[in-house]
Image (tube, rainbow, N blue to C red):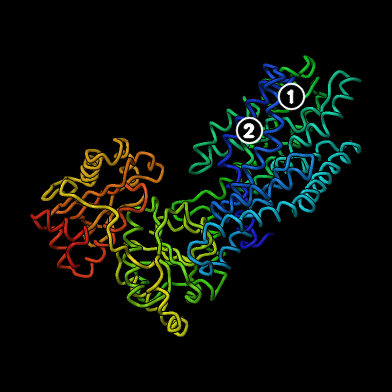
Amino acid sequence: MLSPDTKVKIQNFGRFLSNMVMPNIGAFIAWGFLTALFIPTGWLPNEALAKMVGPMITYLLPLLIGYTGGKLVGGERGGIVGAVTTMGVIVGTDIPMFMGAMMVGPLGGWVIKRFDRVIDGKVKSGFEMLVNNFSAGIIGMLLAILSFYLIGPFVKLLSGMLAGGVAVLVENHLLPLTSIFVEPAKILFLNNAINHGIFSPLGIQQATEHGKSIFFLIEANPGPGFGILLAYMVFGRGNAKQSAAGASIIHFLGGIHEIYFPYVLMNPRLILAVIAGGMTGVFTLTLFDAGLVSPASPGSIFAVLLMTPKDSLLGVLAAILAATTVSFLVAALFLRVQQPSSQHEDDLDGATRKMKAMKAGSKGAVPAAAKSSATTSATSGPMNYQGIERIVVACDAGMGSSAMGASLLRKKVQEAGLPIKVTNLAINNLDESADLVITHRDLTERARRHAPHARHISLDNFLDNGLYQGLISSLKAANDDQYQQTLSIAANDDDYQATTTPLFTLSADNIRLGLHAKDKETAIRVAGEMLVKGGYVEPEYITAMLQREQLVSTYLGESIAVPHGTIEAKDKVKRTGVVICQYPAGVQFGADKDDVARLVIGIAAGNDEHIQVITNLTNALDDPSLIEQLATTRDPQFVLDLLSGHRAA
């Protein structure tokens, strides 16, 4: 039995592989359609258009995977270096390099990220672009050469070993056992190499002698993948469940088997389901002595049936049905076991917490002053606050709640003289550079998945002064000697300084006082309509604001709510805009009866121009009388002056 720690590592690894592939599914679909339509065995054979099929699978798809893997690890620069590195394995071999791209893409991102950390703060002003460009080019070139001579040939050797294992089973009449090799190899995108490199030549020879061959359907049987997708449709969760229906159509009817691979990578245990389904399908084919007359390309149910002779029709259908059924039942068992009950979260989340808990002494509980309103990524032993150089306050969209929390914490960090960078981000943009991540408790699990190596604090109120003050005290106590030596860093670092010239200017049209609203939906719509009227957003942004509120309440505490759109709605933002809506009687925003907002600040941010307004507002939080005045004043100029930075806070 694998330990919980090992299981979580395997699951996280599978999730990382999936994250390299999922953003590029559209490219796989485009390639699949070109293959299905225009190759010689396709629906509409076209020699000219079929010329795109080879270059896409040889160059385009591996390069996209390599770029995405590099970007996941090292950001945009990591993506560039990852793509350059991937060219090494592509040119260094003569088989599709999906597996190689999954190896060298993240390697390129990791190397450039390590390089950036080493030179951080050591490049003279004005030379940054020069250093960035040349370092990416040189490192990419060296890694491409390494991939060409070492990694590419290694991957080809590994591919050959897998193919050789299949050939041994074929020669010894153990065909059902071929699924033990075939199905995992398919998930690693070696399906074409196995199908066309091994089974098609064997099948053509057998079909010439007997008029049909079982080899054509060992890899091309759509049943195992179809069973996986059906299991996700019934027992899956979140995006996986929602997308499984569409993926099943593409897989089963379109024959693009690659569409289900990421679903297995998300949960590596499901490889047992596709193996069981594959073995059942091959056994059924041997039982009925069924086969195809030619390769089914692509592996669509239509292509399979078109290549099925009359005397094999029953056997082929039975093999597909049996493979689907067994794969579905095994996958359903695994998915059902990890489903969250009313008292437990899903198995992945629980295992992640257990893993964190085992790392005693490195990641632990929150400061005593903050325990009442926060939890951490682990609960055994005190959190180690040494070595924290970057704190990220994160929320779903990264423009409202997190911006205000980061502004408040940044001010306290500056006052304490700590050389720590405090920034805010959308959760999806988190990466390994974060040492400590602060999120709303409902979003912490998502944050852990994006920044698994960071220390995490979850909270209910982004404006919790007590939590931030407790955090500051713990940071100073744990690293007092280090901080005393570097007090001047924070004062001189541009990332710590709030700009003295507002990048975004409020006007009286952005402010409405003395409003009344029966509920928060009404208040959000009012703010959204003001943003639309001001020319900041398209009308669809209002719907996105309401959707964002359903994810996690945008009530921050201190009588303030900051509704804004989801991160997906950024394309609906024409220009940065902030509107202030005052509700003296208050509007119920949160689940708690005390979560009443008197200031509703609607935000539409295409960039960070609105941060100055957020900074000025958080400065006012130190003086409760100012918040009370903002919530009750009848003078728009008072609000305008305070939030534009013209009135001392």
Q: Is residue 397 above or below residue 167?
A: below
Q: CA distance from mark 2 to mark 1?
A: 16 Å
Q: Is residue 41 above or below residue 514?
A: above
Residue holding disc 2 = 226
The quadrant of the image that shows the N terminus is: bottom right
Q: Residue at x 55, y 42 (%)?
A: 23
Kind of residue at disc 1: Ala
* Residue 377 in view in this figure: no
Q: Is residue 436 above or below residue 282?
A: below
Mark toward the start of the polypeptide (2 vs 1): 2
Q: Residue at x 42, y 75 (%)?
A: 489
Residue 312, image x, y percentages: 78, 19
Which residue, as the protein is rendered here, is positioned at the far front? Answer: 126
Q: Is residue 382 above or below residue 169?
A: below
Q: Quadrant of residue 177?
A: top right
- Viewer-proximal residue, 23 or 646? 646
The quadrant of the image that shows the C terminus is: bottom left
Question: In this rendering, would 398 be left or right of 34?
Answer: left
